[in-house]
């Protein structure tokens, strides 16, 4: 009985995965409003009956995709401090940073939000999730009390988003481990007293 249930679960998961991938692929080529259920099932190589077993509308697929991404994003962000009573950033290792593994896992989705107008609001939602996690779950003991915690959390969230946008625009040429190493180096080497030499063309 257990094996039968497992087989059914795997079949359901496989069908839903195919429908989600089909929708994302279609959204790269045409406006969401113009995508039909027929378009989705044909690309997924499934029938309409299978679609209606799992979803009522195409919007339900998109909503589930976004829920999947957000859930995995939260889990990946929490990974370095999950189960810890304290979190020392100075002892953080690249292997503990899982955000970029998450981005690679959902590469089609992130490519869509960066390189198209399909999900214009998701980038802000992404940053709001990271900002909320930082504020609610990480009691940041900053030495400079003049720094506004909300602005600091927002700065960090948008910095990570900026790295993800660069990764997508560069065609995912950097591995998730390399991105984690770079993020850690940036965190560890950020100094407020760094002196830079401006090079403004036209002066």
Image (cartoon, rainbow, N blue to C red):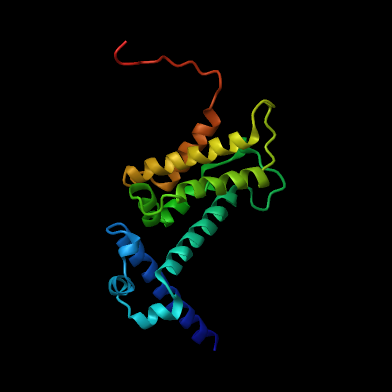
Toward the bottom, the furthest residue is 1
Quadrant where the C terminus is found in the figure: top left
**Left of 173 or right of it: where is 1?**
right
For residue 203, side relative to residue 127 (left or right):
left
Estimate the x, y position of residue 20 in percent, counting from the top left.
39, 67
Q: Position of residue 170 (x, y in %)?
A: 32, 42
Q: Looking at the image, which residue sits at the far top?
A: 203
Tell me residue 166's x, y (percent). 38, 40
Viewer-side residue, 70 vs 196: 70
Residue 26 occupies quadrant: bottom left
Residue 63 against residue 176 in the figure, above or below: below
Which residue occupies the extreme front position in the image?
33
Residue found 54% across the figure and 35% down from its top? 155
Vertical placement of 177 versus 31: above or below? above
**What residue lies at 33% left-to-right and 80% top-to-bottom?**
47
Q: Position of residue 163 (x, y in %)?
A: 43, 40
* Residue nearer the viewer, 155 or 2: 155
Left or right of 121 on screen, residue 171? left
Say which residue appears at 51% left-offset and 61% top-offset: 67
**Vertical placement of residue 34 versus 163, above or below:** below
* 64 w.r.t. 88: above or below: below
Residue at horizontal 64 percent and vertical 52 percent from the top: 82
Quadrant housing the N terminus:
bottom right
Query: How many labels, in total?
Result: 0
Query: 89 or 74: nearer the eye?
Result: 74
């Amino acid at each position: 009985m257990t094996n039968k249930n497992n087989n059914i679960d795997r079949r359901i998961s496989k069908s839903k995965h195919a429908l989600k991938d089909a929708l994302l692929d279609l959204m790269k080529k045409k406006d969401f409003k113009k995508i039909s259920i027929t378009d989705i099932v044909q690309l997924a190589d499934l029938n309409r009956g299978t679609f209606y077993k799992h979803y009522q509308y195409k919007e339900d697929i998109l909503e589930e995709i976004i829920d999947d991404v957000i859930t995995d994003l939260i889990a990946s962000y929490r990974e370095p401090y999950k189960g810890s009573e304290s979190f020392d950033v100075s002892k953080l290792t690249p292997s503990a940073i899982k955000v970029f593994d998450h981005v690679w896992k959902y590469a089609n989705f992130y490519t869509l939000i960066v390189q198209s107008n399909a999900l214009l609001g998701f980038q802000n939602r992404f940053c709001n999730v990271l900002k909320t996690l930082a504020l609610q779950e990480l009691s940041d003991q900053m030495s400079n009390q003049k720094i506004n915690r909300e602005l600091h959390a927002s700065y960090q969230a948008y910095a990570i988003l900026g790295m993800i946008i660069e990764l997508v625009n560069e065609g995912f040429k950097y591995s998730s481990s390399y991105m984690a190493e770079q993020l850690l180096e940036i965190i560890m080497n950020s100094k407020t007293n760094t002196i830079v030499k401006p090079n403004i063309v036209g002066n």
